Image: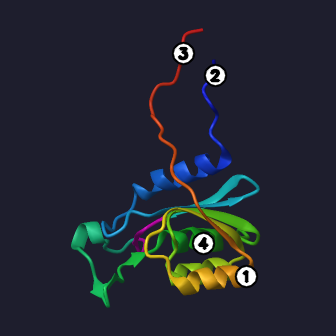
Amino acid sequence: MAEKRLTWQDYFMANAELISKRSTCDRAYVGAVLVKNNRIIATGYNGGVSETSNCSEVGHQMEDGHCIRTVHAEMNALIQCAKEGISTDNTEIYVTHFPCINCTKALLQAGIKKITYKTPYNPHAFAKELMAQKGVQYVEHGVPKLTLGDDTKEK
């Protein structure tokens, strides 16, 4: 009997989880996947500004309880689209953590229509209010348990 095929939601969330492993700030390993019409258009993870020092190299740059050295995963995914001229209007994002208030505002401004997250890490009430005002769905969705390896089978 064939194994169950991943749903699109499981597939994209598993990708976000894998991408989070590239994060360079150990305060939160976050991965994000921007999706349009069931196709990945960009990814992002928590990390320093390109070609500058990051937290794993020189430590955190803390201000008001936040590491200001880090660009959030959601912002990095949006920035990749901006650099490549890819529209984010009517897209979805899969992210390992509920977006912070600033990422929420950027996602809404960019035309994101649905936010799927794994961990309800400190969800801001105003972020939820803004999503409701814009008619943007936000859905908690776990990561499927996967085993990566050689899946070849003798025929």
Q: Which mark is residue 2?
A: 2
Residue lying at the far left of the rendered structure: 58
Q: Mark 1 points at which residue?
A: 134
Check disc 3: other Cα within 10 Å, few if <14, some if 14-19, many if 20+: few
Coordinates of residue 80 in the picture (x, y in percent): 59, 68
- Residue type at mark 4 is Leu
Disc 4 to disc 2, C-alpha distance: 37 Å
Q: Mark 4 points at which residue?
A: 78
Circle 3/circle 4 CB separation < 8 Å:
no
* Residue at x 34%, y 83% (from the top left corner): 66
46 is within the stretch colored magenta: yes
Check disc 4: other Cα within 10 Å, few if <14, some if 14-19, many if 20+: many
145 left or right of 109?
left
Front-most of 105 and 141? 141
Residues shaded magenta: 45-50
Q: Earlier in the sequence, mark 4 or mark 2?
A: 2
Disc 3 to disc 4, C-alpha distance: 39 Å
- Residue type at mark 1 is Lys
- Residue type at mark 2 is Ala
Q: Which mark is residue 51?
A: none
Q: What element carries label 4?
A: helix
